[in-house]
Image (spheres, rainbow, N blue to C red):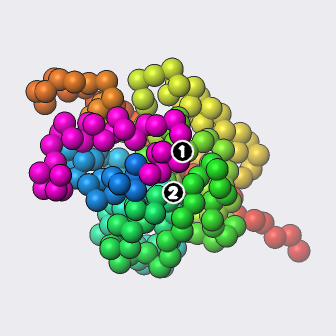
Amino acid sequence: MSNSRRTAADARSAFQSCRSPDPKDRVQFYDSWAETYEKDHGLASYRAPHLAVEFLSKNFCGSPEEALVLDVACGSGWVAKLMFELGFRNFVGVDGSKGMLEQAVKSSLYQDLRLALLGSQQLPAQTGTFDVVIIVGALRPGFVPVSIVRELCQAAKPGGYVCMTRVDPKSESGDRYKASMELELHLMEDEGLWTHVATEDMHHYMVDVYNNHNKEEQNEQYLNGTMYLYRKKEYRRYF
């Protein structure tokens, strides 16, 4: 079905299909979903990229034009497009789907795009390099493990920002993931790896396409989420 003819029912079906427990099957699905990915997310009122970029921008201290951004789980390049509108110009993208990276190439925004399945493979980023590391939408049970958070921090340069969003699925696994992630964030702060900048709730993150089957928009249920922003500790020199 062409992109222009996609319906909310098509989008709901796609979201259901992307939850395969087998990572290889999930990657194959994302490869096939790439062309209609943004359209389907729009049909699901997916607001996470807009909310996350706005959240980062209002807390970012520095020159957007000079900042080097690592866009993790970049998908089709949605986040980079929004950041470009706010003056950011230098992007490196990472995603586990070749099809998604092919869509990201079309944006002409990325200096480099790297294929890696997060959790199964190490984040392909040089340590201490990026002014901004951002991941939107992928931190959830069955997709990207909490362990990736330390790799995000490692990729940031001293003084660099790490911006993360996490959806709140209405499930026991979602509750466990949230608790595990927030414990890791606090542990890393206690270890002196970074400092907390801001945390903000995301209201109406997207329509609950997994559990909600009401056809009338006014009756649809929404998922919420949380945005986190940390700043990597700068090294002190003692003479």
Q: Residue at x 66, y 44 (%)?
A: 147
- Magenta stretch encompasses residue 13: yes
* 3D distance between C-alphas at marks 2 and 1: 10 Å
Task: Kindly identify the amino acid type of the residue bearing the numbered disc 1.
Answer: Pro
Is the C-beta separation of discs 2 and 1 under 8 Å?
yes
Q: Is residue 212 above or below residue 55?
A: above
Q: Amino acid at mark 2?
A: Gly
User: The C terminus lies in which quarter of the figure?
Assistant: bottom right
Q: Residues within 10 Å of mark 1 (few under 14, many from 20)?
A: some
Q: Position of residue 173 (x, y in %)?
A: 53, 25
Horizontal and vertical percent for residue 156? 62, 63
* Residue that label 1 marks: 23
Quick check: can you spot residue 235?
A: yes
Residue 203 appears in the picture as rendered: no
Task: Provide the residue designation for mark 2.
Answer: 96
Task: Give residue 8's quadrant in the image.
Answer: top left
